[in-house]
Image: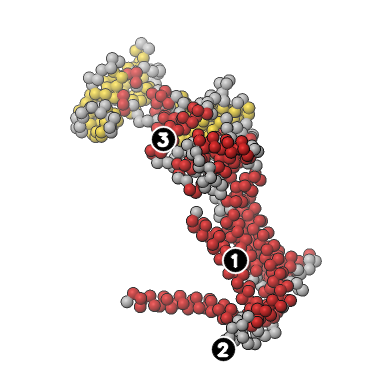
Amino acid sequence: MRRLRALPSIAILAAGYGFIFLPVVVLVLFSFQDGRLPVPPFKGFSLDWYEHVFANRRLMDGLGHSLAVALGSSAAATVLGFLAAWGLARARPRWAGAAQYVLMAPMTVSYLIIGMGLLITFNALGIPKSLVAVGAGHLVINLPLAFAICYAQLGEHQATVEQAARDLGASEAQALLLITVPMLWPALIASFCLAFTLSWDEFVIAFLLTRFDVTLPVAIWSMLRSGLNPETNAAGTLVFAVSIVLVLAVETLVLRRARRG
Amino acid sequence: MADAHVELSGLGRSYGETVAVAAIDLAIARGEFVVLLGPSGSGKTTVLGMVGGFVRPSRGRVLIDGADVTELSPAQRPTTTVFQDYALFPHMSVAGNVGFGLAMRKVPRPERERRVAEALDLVNLTGFGRRGVHELSGGQRQRVALARAIAVAPSVLLLDEPLGALDLALRRQMQDELVALQKRLGTTFIHVTHDQEEAMSIADTVVVLNHGRIEDSGPPRRVYARPRTLFSATFMGESNLIEGTVEAREGALPRIATALGPLVVPGAGEPGDAVVLVVRPEHIAPEGHDDGRPRLALGHARIASAVFQGNYVRATAISLVDGRSVRLNLPPAARIAPDDELALTAAAEDVVVLPRGA
């Protein structure tokens, strides 16, 4: 009886998950297609398309560019976000509230608007489209995230611990490097990994701000223009796999430790 | 005091319109165990923060060993602090915590290890150096915080309600250990608490604070027996207060008109002064008690409740004269029961006379 009553909710749950994950499953499945078209029926298992991906110069260049952009922009976002959070939490200027809003504001703006804004600004300044420009764009979207994650960790107790370090003779820099950074290590890793995943598969800003050297999502998009092909599925699967690995890394490294602590 | 170790002169702190600490003056001798006692909001932690360098004073100066440290950072002062929530470094071992101050002073590793071991011995944590902070109990963390603060051999140790989070038995034990440690090190301790029993059991000098002012300061025995202000009398232990007015002086002593009749009590006061008589519960005894000292009659009262406490009987009586409630502690042998009527007395010299406004 009880099981029967639970049936509708199970069905809704299944439909929800199906809606979210079915496209991904189809994408991954047909990346192994032994045939020329990534559509049913599934003709058999093959790794040929992955070979194609790794032999594809354009995709491999894109992969390298994406890695460089993601590493650079995530590291910059984490360092700047942490310093902004630490400065605001410790110095507590009168305008701290306003500064917090300004720092968080980019979260409310769509990637399209950010990309267009940067495009117009860089154009006006005579800065050409480049991977560095994309990195700047990703820094804009990731800084609020890094700031919010770090700011949440810098409460009253953390302040007292830093005070204890200074009381024992630590300079401001020593307190920051020997106490604050190690204590916030999980938050810093979490912030870096989340920023990395966002930058890694971001398309709109990367599309607007690149011309010759493109990131992986942009390279995949240009392949899609020439029609469906299991090779694009394979490339997409690789992008997805990297994101999943990072999210799992955050989960095991940070969240589990936080729950234990 | 010319040879004061720590001297606060006109020290105060305001937050906007709110005065946390009014201009206070206090001289602390070398090797003294001083307890700042007061309710929450009395400014005691702010005073400690100004001595440690965490709170910038709005006025006044802090002198340690005669040197003005008012403008110095916490790191530059010869003080260390044991924080209320211990503020241990969770990512370091016990030895890492205790040795942190020495590492900041660039003490070479062999000497550092020796001094860390010494500090851990002093707080009875011998051999705990390699443990993580997370593996320790509350009492052990407290000891690590203490060891960390004494490892750098500060000239003044500041303790901000360090025993507040411990259970009663452990708190008593730590009080005894703190006193023993302080005598052994000879370091000046300034300890903040709101617990008057704790203050009495550990202090050489109690400084009673209220509303950012020093109400009283002296040895606990004196502050308890002869409080200087009404606040001090009611905050340090229990008191019965009897209001009155000085009528005249009988020889050297004032005669005070009260609801219980005229009482002649040793103390100051000119005719016309409004005063309060402070009588401790243990100083009240039934009529007939004779210890050879002149006694005051405090009128008849009916016992409302009597609770046996082991070493005394804690009783409440209602005065038949003015209907007020009277708190009295009687010897454990006293056979009293509710509704008994007693004539209450107290030795005249045990009663303290204070001006009413104080």
Q: Which mark is residue B173?
A: 3
Residue B113 appears in the picture as rendered: yes
**Number of residue marks:** 3
Q: Nearer the viewer, residue A96 or A211?
A: A211
Occupied quadrant, residue B151:
top right
Mark 1 element type: helix
Q: Earlier in the sequence, mark 1 or mark 2?
A: 2
Whether the residues at callouts 3 and 1 have beta carbons within 8 Å, the answer is no
- Residue carrying label 2: A41
Disc 3 with disc 2 on a shared chain? no
Q: Secondary structure at mark 3?
A: helix
* The C terminus of chain B lies in quadrant: top left
Q: At 56% from the left edge and 23% from the top edge, which residue is drawn? A: B4
Q: Position of residue A164 (x, y in %)?
A: 57, 41
Going by the numbered disc 3, the residue's amino acid type is: Gln
Q: Nearer the viewer, residue A130 or A62?
A: A62
